Image (tube, rainbow, N blue to C red):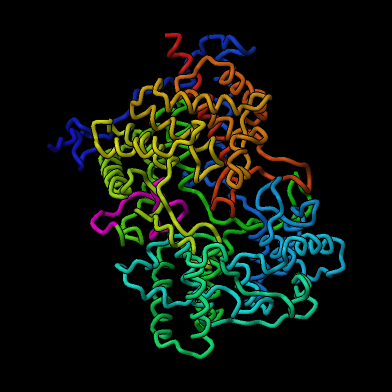
Amino acid sequence: MTIKSEIPKSGIAAEPAPATTRRPQKSKTYSEAPRKLKFGRIDADLSEVESAAARARDHIFSLQDPAGFWCGELEADPMLEADYIFAHTLLGTGDQGKLDRALTEILRYQNADGGWSIYPGGPSNISLSVKCYFACKIMGISAEDPILVKAREWILANGGVVECNTFTKIYLCFLGQYEYDAVPAIPPEIVLFPKWFYFNIYEISSWSRAILVPLSIAYAKKPFKKIRTDQGIDELFVGGRANASLHLRWDKKHLLGWRNFFLLCDRMTHWFERVHIRPLRKIALKKAEKWMLERLEMSDGLGAIYPAMLNAIIALRCLGYSLDDPQVIRAIDEFEKLGIDNPSGTPEYPEPTFRMQPCMSPVWDTAQAVYALGEAGVTRNDSRLLKAADWMLSKEVRHKGDWAVKNGKAEPGGWYFEFNNEFYPDVDDTAQVLLALNKVDNPRERYQYDVSQRAIDWIFSMQCKNGGWASFDKDNTKMIFQHIPFADHNAMLDPPTVDITGRILETLATYGYTRKDKRIERAIKFIYDEQEADGSWFGRWGVNYIYGTFLVLRGLEAIGVWNHEPQVQQAAEWLRSVQNADGGWGETCGSYDDPATRGVGPSTPSQTAWAILGLLSAGDTRSDSVAKGIKWLLDRQEKDGSWDESIGQGATRQALYTGTGFPRVFYLAYHLYRDYFPLLALTNYKRAMEREEA
């Protein structure tokens, strides 16, 4: 017997659709007189919380662009600056001043052991260290300079160049520093596999797809630019380049495993390359070129992400496009827009620098800021929120992208992360934008309702078989792809995650959905199945278990799960157990490498806010943990209403990374996380205290 859901698939709520989307009860604004309610366990009252939140609110508004959006800096490791120097060296382009300043940025972050790390305070990383070393050599630093002597010692002690990942090795091939025959093959023929074929390109993650297709063109064309001998890195091969074993090693423990199968295929591909048996190469290159050119439209560069954009420029040049071709000019312009140039330095670090961002985050930052401000009591018809809402509405996706290959019946809807990226909307951004729009009374209420309806329908269409949601694709879960030799960037798949699923539950609850809908019950089951033994949840898109746990608890509370359920209380106890002695919470990116360190790290404003929000969602409003966490935020707020989330001083000053690109490979510092999440935590705490008093 099938029980039909009381909530229609096409409706936002069970009852007849109103003229506007369903909203939660309006919260009080800051214009109301504060009530003098004592915390009880810390020396403060709610008026202090309200004052701090008001300052944070004003600070966030001060960062709003006149066009209505927010876009904080998105910071990453020095790989971006190293690749920037490499790219312009290969292309024979670039502004010398920017290149010099990019080198300064690289040198700022060298570790004491000589290497470079992919997150502040982390261990040195071999691929990043080789790239930074090579960039230094290209820019004229001598191999005998103490900077490079120290770096070389660390690199050689850790296996040398041969231990780098595939993308690094291929880039080295372009400048004659590695052998094409020794890198994993990325033949363009992969684009010819039909969509029904098990190994077609739509079975890998969207970002890997955007990176690999142009890289396959470059691999097929095998560009080579000779550089001066003194710019080379032969000294980074253990025992010398002539004696180094460059080829990938077989898995001797699992002779019949998938790794060896793919290595055999790789060796066969290289053999076909050497004897020029490539009957489909011309067709494959044409299709790869067409695929790439199509996705350069309605986008800020291919995929609107740094590595894909860089590879697209190289691929266009390999295909014969001149530097003055409109496609190349546009691709380079979009790439350069990611740069942040400080030719006069900054107050914190006076030496001139230039750094690159991996992408831009305006839709994400705007949605988070509007939601936090709305929760903080900013009136629903505030002109600044309305301007932000209209800007977000203008970014709605109305064309089918790569997601439609496995979800062809769904109509387009939702939002992407960047300014323009029509082929790649993502579920997480879409859910957050819906939460933000619900905080605004828009005069175009019918239009906003229709846009929200399309987005919710699209979200439901993207639900995976196991009940969870991924970011860009549906059921992108074929683990076999992680054994492919060029998959060592650890991001070949886009599986469903609990952090995104938790946010979606919160969104759907906001728009009137309940547990009576069987799709929501499937999502809850997915979340329960993914819970760790200690009660935490893994965070795929934020660092790490604190992030995953906070979003799950928010979602479960919103959708009506009783906060005394064992899963909820176990998660709350885990959050309390990992609180730092100073009252805050922190977790480093190292927890992706060693789960035993989950919840361990210096306290940060964003992670402290996440933990507080998680505990509040679990019904914990009066514990010492929550009180101390609030006190930690109050004590560390700056005079302008912001929070600082960095370590070091002057030349060594670095933002701590609480955002995740690819676990174990690439991490991010969202510069606005430290502002809008603490605001959200303070206002949610104040509201919880007022409810208890009432």
Magenta includes 634?
no
Q: Main secondary structure of the magenta part?
A: loop
Q: Residue at x 67, y 34 (%)?
A: 602
**Relative to 499, does residue 101 appear above or below in the rendering?**
below
Rendered location of residue 206, percent (x, y): 43, 60
Q: Nearer the viewer, residue 437 or 659?
A: 659
Q: Residue at x 55, y 16 (%)?
A: 623
Magenta includes 417?
yes
Quarter of the image that includes the N terminus: top left
Regarding residue 300, the answer to whether it shows in the image is no
**Relative to 469, does residue 619 appear above or below in the rendering?**
above
Q: Residue at x 72, y 40 (%)?
A: 647
Rendered location of residue 479, percent (x, y): 43, 57
Q: Quadrant of residue 126?
A: bottom right
Rendered location of residue 672, percent (x, y): 57, 41
Q: Residue at x 39, y 85 (%)?
A: 280
Q: Which residues are magenta?
A: 407-429
**Relative to 7, does residue 349 appear above or below in the rendering?**
below
Farthest residue toward the bottom?
275
Task: State the count of labels.
Answer: 0
Q: Nearer the viewer, residue 414 or 188?
A: 188
Rendered location of residue 165, percent (x, y): 61, 65
Q: Quadrant of residue 116?
A: bottom right
Q: Nearer the viewer, residue 517 or 454?
A: 517
Regarding residue 324, the answer to whether it shows in the image is yes
Q: Quadrant of residue 4?
A: top left
- Judged left or right of residue 347, residue 405 is left
Quarter of the image that includes the C terminus: top left
**Relative to 543, does residue 90 appear above or below in the rendering?**
below
